[in-house]
Amino acid sequence: MEEIQSQSDLYRSSSSCASSPTSRVPSSHFFYVRKPGSLRQPISFEDSPEWDDPDARMEYEAGGVGGDSINDAAATPISPSLSKINSGSMASPHVPEGAGGSAVRKIAGASIAWRDLTVTMTGKRKYSDKVVKSSNGYAFPGTMTVIMGPAKSGKSTLLRALAGRLPPSAKMYGEVFVNGSKSHMPYGSYGYVERETELIGSLTVREFLYYSALLQLPGFLFQKRGVVEDAIQAMSLSDYANKLIGGHCYMKGLRSGERRRVSIARELVMRPHILFIDEPLYHLDSVSALLMMVTLKKLASMGCTLVFTIYQSSTEVFGLFDRICLLSNGNTLFFGETLACLQHFSNAGFPCPIMQSPSDHFLRAINTDFDRIIAMCKNWQDDNGDFSAVNMDTAVAIRTLEATYKSSEDAASVETMIFKLTEREGTQLKSKGKAGAATRVAVLTWRSLLVMSREWKYYWLRLILYMILTLCIGTLYSGLGHSLSSVATRVSAVFVFVSFASLLGIAGIPSLLKEIKIYGSEASNQHSGAFVFLLGQFLGSIPFLFLMSISSSLVFYFMVGLRDDFSLLMYFVLNFFMCLLVNEGLMLFIACLWRDVYWTTLTLISLHVIMMLSAGHFRIRNALPKPVWTYPLAYISFHTYSIEGLLENEYLGEVFAVGEVRSISGYEAIRGDYQISPDTSSKWRNMLVLLAMAFGYRLIVYVLLRFGLNKNVSARLLLCHRKNNSSR
């Protein structure tokens, strides 16, 4: 205690300009107090010691689900610390007339409370690392509750625990109540927005939200259009509704602030009672951050319960919060009204300086990373002597704030409020239903067709590359004729065409990876599933793959001068189409396994080189070493079946004259250059093998996506990437 007292005295002396919020209230520098009518005019830079905000206590209203429990809880006095502030020169907030349920709400919110919530993550020892420790808190409809703290303080973990979205490696203890009940929140009753959400850049905002509504909601199409328009209005996206998210040609796409609002609007199409947002101000500048929070404040005024995490905020943004849950190393240092947090820090001996943002002051006191700055600056001097602004041990500050909060009236009032919210169960939240599987497949197929047609890097670039490759091969192998001496050269031409065309398919890896990320974002919120995603992607890719196969095959077929027969030409086209389908499935499998452009490209190039070597061109398959090269490489290489089928299509039934009397069959002419079967039906068996491989690769992808077997590989890769960035 002596150490704590000495540190508190040192901080008081170093902050000579600081004073407690109670003494600062009459001052003209109390700039973070909200003015009357804050929902309509949420920012005030004027000096105002009075607080008479009729809309600040949205939790008194009973428009949400389970209104009885909310009304009972609202009868409890507000935070004791805030009452102390109001007992000075500030007017106590009052309940607006007619707020007992007459106000019309567009969204029915729900109360949420958590008691003794502890989350542990598996580490070196099983369930030994406590990420969140005995957290208590609550949130009302029509309010914004923010979870604030430094990096790795447990903010996102607590948010995931409240939303029921913890990973399998986490274990939760404690209780979470929704409208006084411990029942699980059903689908559609809540929304969750990740810190980084993948959007489809080739769609407009309205199209993106409309397809999201089709994936999420049951019912008729015209009903979903109204929901989409409501979400656009709620997130202030009317000016960007018809603008492409990612831009086009020389037109810029949406900025990070608008993109973040689009990701939130996607969850609003379900009209959730509770909305959880992980870092809504992530990567936003000050203007975009302020606009985001004003928009969320407007959303909260419609009745939705908002709970989100935040790392740091400006003074204006901080003034919009209703309640704050302050975390450090998993410990709750404070929960209560925003202004009461200032009084709490003052009571603990760490008052906020007048010209400093409250959130900056909070994080300065509880962020242990500042200890490194103290170590660097301890021998330095400025104009006023020591660097007093950073001369504070954060570990001592954390212990002081935690001990002060546990023994304060604020902690007791939180427990009382939780008891009132949970003593009687309110209305149970109900599921709003899902779109059917057939509807989702149709929506994803149509959306894939639209995206693939607009995104030139997806298939149009590959089509151009295929045509260039085909023209190069056609001019290189043109004029071969149909003599016996041209057999070996013709085999080489078919081998180069199939192998190099498959290799050029790697150009579509970035688009596939982006599509997998979009699936992951939608699947995490149950908007999509592994089966409907793969089926929609497969059906959407068929027209483009067939276009590439028929255009490339026609150019190659006639420039090289293969047999002039329509049925043989159609088989050539179908065989190459199946080859592209298999290659697409292989790319999807490797991309799903690694989730990284570099490793996916490297793996595919290596696999294609190995399949080229074992395809039977450089050395006939009978002469390949039996272990590894013949079994299994030669039999799992789709190059082998495609090339063999094309050569059987070309040479079976063909007769070559040897001199004037003798002639040999096409099978005898080619068997010295490539091993094929003499059976005329063998080419169709090769076609079936290619078709089976195309579905087989997608079946493996389904298993990876459905059961999450690829998460360990991608997690390790992400960890290595973060380590490399931190070392830089």
Image: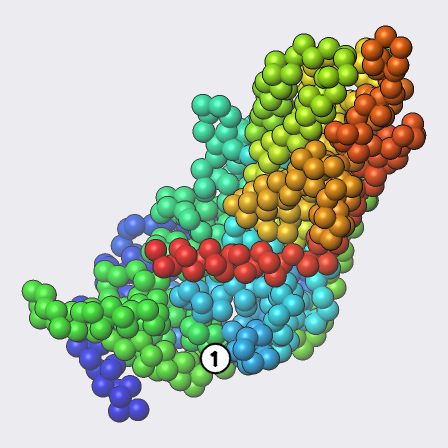
Where residue 147 sits in the image (x, y, percent)? Answer: 48, 64
Residue identifier under label 1 = 411
Where residue 550 sits in the image (x, y, percent)? Answer: 74, 20
Instruction: Identify the image's colour scheme: rainbow, by chain, secondary structure or one colour.
Output: rainbow
Q: Is residue 15 left or right of residue 520?
A: left
Q: Quadrant of residue 670?
A: top right
**Vertical comparison of 98 with 695: above or below:** below
As helix, strand or loop, the secondary structure at mark 1 comes to helix
**Vertical comparison of 673 with 358: above or below:** above
Q: Amino acid at mark 1?
A: Ala
At x 21%, y 77%, the residue is: 12
Q: Is residue 556 left or right of residue 31?
A: right
Q: Which corner quadrant holds the C terminus? A: bottom left
Seen from the viewer's position, the closer of residues 669 and 702 is 669
Pick out the residue farthest to the top.
Answer: 660
Where residue 417 sits in the image (x, y, percent)? Answer: 56, 75
Asked if residue 103 can be seen in this view, the reply is no
Q: Which corner quadrant holds the N terminus? A: bottom left
Seen from the viewer's position, the closer of residues 615 and 206 is 615
Q: Quadrant of residue 126?
A: bottom right
At x 45%, y 58%, the residue is: 722
At x 88%, y 14%, the residue is: 662
Badge 1: how crowded within 10 Å, few (<14), some, or many (20+)? Answer: many
At x 55%, y 75%, the residue is: 123
**Vertical comparison of 349 with 288: above or below:** below
Seen from the viewer's position, the closer of residues 205 and 683 is 683
Where residue 254 sits in the image (x, y, percent)? Answer: 48, 35
Seen from the viewer's position, the closer of residues 93 and 262 is 262
Number of labelled discs? 1
